[in-house]
Amino acid sequence: MFIPIFIASIILHTNATSIVSRSQSHSLSQPGVLGPQTSIIIGNKVIAPDGFERSATLVDGTFPGPLIAAQKGDRFSIEVVNELMDDAMFKSTSVCDGLKGPLVIYDPHDPLAYMYDIDDVNTIITLSDWYHSVAPVLRGISGLTPNSTLINGHGRYTGGPMSELAVISVERGKRYRMRLIAMACYPNYLFSIDGHNLTVIEADGQLTEPLVVDQLQIYAGQRYSVVLVADMAVDNYWIRALPNLVNSSYEGGVNTAILRYNGAPKADPTTTNTTVNSPLQETNLHALINPGPPGVPGYGKADINVNLTVTTLNGIFYVNGIQFRPPTVPVLLQILSGAQEPSQLLPNGSVVVLEANKIVELTLASDGAGVPHPMHLHGHAVDVVQSAGNSTFNYVNPVRRDVVNAGAFGEQMVIRWITDNSGPWFLHCHIDWHLDTGFAVVMAESPSDTRAHLNLIPSEWDQLCPIFDSLSPSQLGGRNHS
């Protein structure tokens, strides 16, 4: 049976755009591209993206899922239809099983549009780790090594067949905005393209001053836009994404895709790995628009200074001594039901209440295992006033983004933002195993304003829980095949 399990209708906040671009070079009506008002089907299918067959959880039967594209300011209305056949898949985290895809918000007034000619569905590059076991099996295993790296849904694994690799086609003389998205559950990647420099112009939806690099490290959940100038000889060139795993290599074409100039033969490249001279350093990235963090410059001089220390014990993560356990009632519903103070909000010790319109400076230090941790704050782009591994602070023009590397053991990162977006915002590690074992807190921003902030909630909202509670187990799990 087909059950619409979720309908979303949201208006985009200009500070929360996922990725920005110029719409002139991208037709939102391209084949295979979904608009902001659409319907998608979540289902199970056996796929072999690296040559090994296994069941996956997919959007519209594809991996990665189809591009959902919109223009800045559009309203999303997405109906999600549950066609799942596997109860275990439905109840687990499905991201590692394939339930992911790109969402791009295009800006018709992109101030950096002069730098590129092409920006469309064909210039999106997704990076994913892939496992030959399904998520319910993997969930309790820490330190697991992925079987392969998938670039745009294709890859090879060590000892496996010479499976098809993803191909990015370019025309010599053209300039391309490549949208790089790390959809990984665990590793980070060293990304490069043989023989080509990359000009970084955006990090996590925030435009940056253009910066030329020949390699960049991208962590789970991060996004970059880079401009590639197709100015080399017509040929095939390796696209490389080396994960931070033991014994990672490119042997046999693993961890690679192909940049193919029009007119080049359909064959694997023979190019050699480019010598790295200009790797991306986060401290060299600077916000292009309204640079500078809010508040008085100087460490500890914000209105609210929050210090978080992460530790681990027996595979469990603790933030300031507390393991995050998802509450029975979501924090948003607790607030809408009248809870306002930290003592009233669950889970105890994992909710930080912040006053409205205050400057927050958050320091996160990791004394636990599994570093480096990519930290993601929902609801805000933050100014990274101290990057991990760097002893200096930047209160003038730091990078602005929403997923920040928290660094190695004993290092710290420091971020700033202003509490101008009322609501409970999740701050968590973007490595799925770490989140699953407690690496998260909730920043409850001005709870007293949240109900007024959400005064446009339709009356149908009140019926969602009763409708959900009335569904049978077979309906909750998808189709009943018994």
Image (cartoon, rainbow, N blue to C red):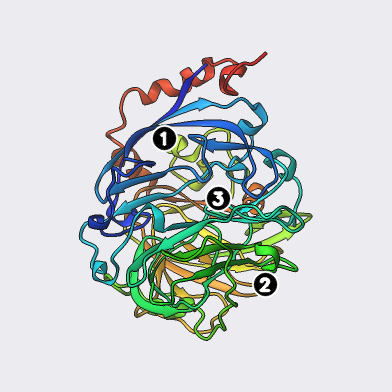
Measured from the top left, where is residue 17 in percent x and y? 33, 54
Q: Distance of mark 1 from mark 2, alpha carbons?
A: 40 Å
Residue 460 visible, this angle: yes
The quarter holding residue 206 reads: bottom left
Picture disc at residue 409: 2
The local crowd at label 1, few if under 14, some if 14 to 19, many if 20 or more residues have their Cα within 10 Å, is few
Amino acid type shown at disc 2: Phe
Question: Which tag, 3 or 2, sits closer to the chain's start?
Answer: 3
The local crowd at label 2, few if under 14, some if 14 to 19, many if 20 or more residues have their Cα within 10 Å, is some
Residue 181 visible, this angle: no
* In this view, the mark in front (3 or 1): 3
Measured from the top left, where is residue 447 in percent x and y? 39, 45
Residue position marked by numbered label 3 in the rendering: 153
Q: Distance of mark 3 from mark 1, alpha carbons?
A: 45 Å
Instruction: Left or right? Give the position of 105 relative to 133.
Output: left
> Measured along the vertical axis of the image, is residue 143 above or below residue 479?
below
Measured from the top left, where is residue 91 in percent x and y? 63, 32
Residue position marked by numbered label 1 in the rendering: 338
Question: Which tag, 1 or 2, sits closer to the chain's start?
Answer: 1
* In this view, the mark in front (3 or 2): 3
The local crowd at label 3, few if under 14, some if 14 to 19, many if 20 or more residues have their Cα within 10 Å, is many
Q: Distance of mark 3 from mark 2, alpha carbons?
A: 32 Å
Amino acid type shown at disc 1: Gly
- Tell me what residue is drawn at x 66 percent, y 74 percent: 410
Q: Looking at the image, do the residues carrying marks 3 and 2 touch, with CB atoms under 8 Å apart?
A: no
* In this view, the mark in front (1 or 2): 2
- Tell me what residue is drawn at x 55 percent, y 59 percent: 220
Is 214 in front, or is 406?
214
Give SS at disc 2.
loop
